[in-house]
């Protein structure tokens, strides 16, 4: 199930689950690897602070989400060909609901950080300006989980644009699920928007 895998992968990074452990030399030499490491270091410092109120914690969660992930790009890509079919109003409504979906889905795990850790195991260049940062998440209640973060550099900034958990792209999976919802609603983007509104209450 997409949400469960994406929930774990994103929340572990957003919850600052970073350990300096043995990583490949390459990870310390690339900007993408450094970006992931710095984001994790900042997150663990923030999310280990149990003195924060729930509201303060959620605000910091949203700030790190924007800092680490290109949410507008992910939202557009996930909607696929339906993005160009949507009106400007529909696009704005969808992007707002998509961000709320991410925050609502992961906020609980963010607030329940319990010390999971991960280590970088490799970094390599992808096409254009993308890099893949491979990590292994260490859990106390299960086997290690292999997660790759697709990082894109644009205008001098690095942003995560996809998460691949055990070989499964979360972006591709979400795109397929959204397309299915739209098709079930006569090919109309409004059907997805309504479904997201219902899901978010």
Image: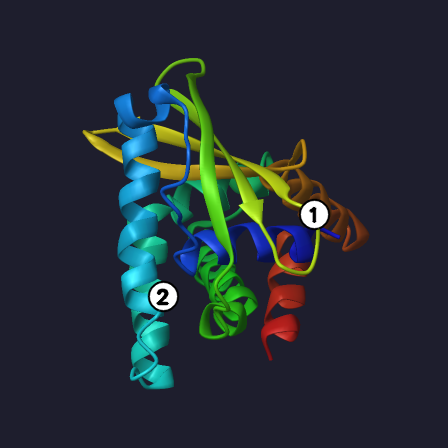
Callout 1: few (<14), some (14-19), or many (20+) C-alpha neighbours within 10 Å?
Answer: few
Locate residue 16, reporting x and y percent. Answer: 39, 57
Q: Position of residue 168 (x, y in %)?
A: 68, 35
Q: Say if residue 190 shows up in the picture.
A: yes
> Is the residue 43 above or below the residue 80 in the image?
below
Q: Is residue 124 above or below residue 112?
A: above
Residue at 52% x, 70% y: name it: 104
**Residue at x 75% of width, y 52% of height:** 1
Quadrant where the C terminus lies? Answer: bottom right
Q: Residue furthest left?
A: 156
First-in-chain label (2 vs 1): 2
Is residue 82 visible to the viewer in this orientation of the structure? no
Q: Which residue is mark 1?
A: 143
Rendered view: 62 above or below 143: below
Q: Mark 1: which secondary structure?
A: loop
Task: Provide residue 160's location: percent of width, then percent of height.
Answer: 40, 39
Residue at image x 29%, y 79%?
56
The quarter of the displayed image where residue 80 is located: top right
What residue would you read off at disc 2? 61
* Label 2 element class: helix
């Amino acid at each position: 199930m997409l949400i469960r895998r994406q929930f774990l992968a994103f929340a572990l990074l957003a919850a600052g689950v970073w350990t300096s452990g043995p990583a490949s030399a390459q990870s310390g030499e690339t900007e993408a690897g450094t970006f992931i490491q710095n984001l994790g270091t900042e997150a663990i410092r923030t999310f280990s602070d149990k003195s924060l109120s729930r509201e303060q914690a959620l605000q910091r969660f949203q700030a790190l989400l924007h800092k680490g992930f290109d949410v507008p790009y992910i939202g557009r890509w996930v909607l696929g060909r339906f993005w160009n079919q949507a009106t400007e109003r529909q696009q704005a409504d969808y992007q707002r609901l998509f961000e709320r979906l991410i925050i609502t889905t992961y906020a609980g795990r963010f607030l329940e950080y319990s010390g999971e850790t991960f280590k970088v195991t490799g970094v390599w260049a992808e096409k254009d300006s993308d890099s893949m940062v491979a990590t292994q998440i260490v859990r106390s209640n299960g086997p290690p989980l292999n997660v790759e973060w697709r990082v894109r550099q644009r205008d001098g900034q690095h942003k995560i644009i996809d998460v691949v958990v055990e070989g499964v792209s979360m972006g591709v999976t979400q795109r397929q699920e959204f397309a299915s919802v739209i098709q079930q609603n006569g090919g109309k983007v409004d059907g997805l928007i309504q479904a997201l509104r219902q899901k978010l209450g």
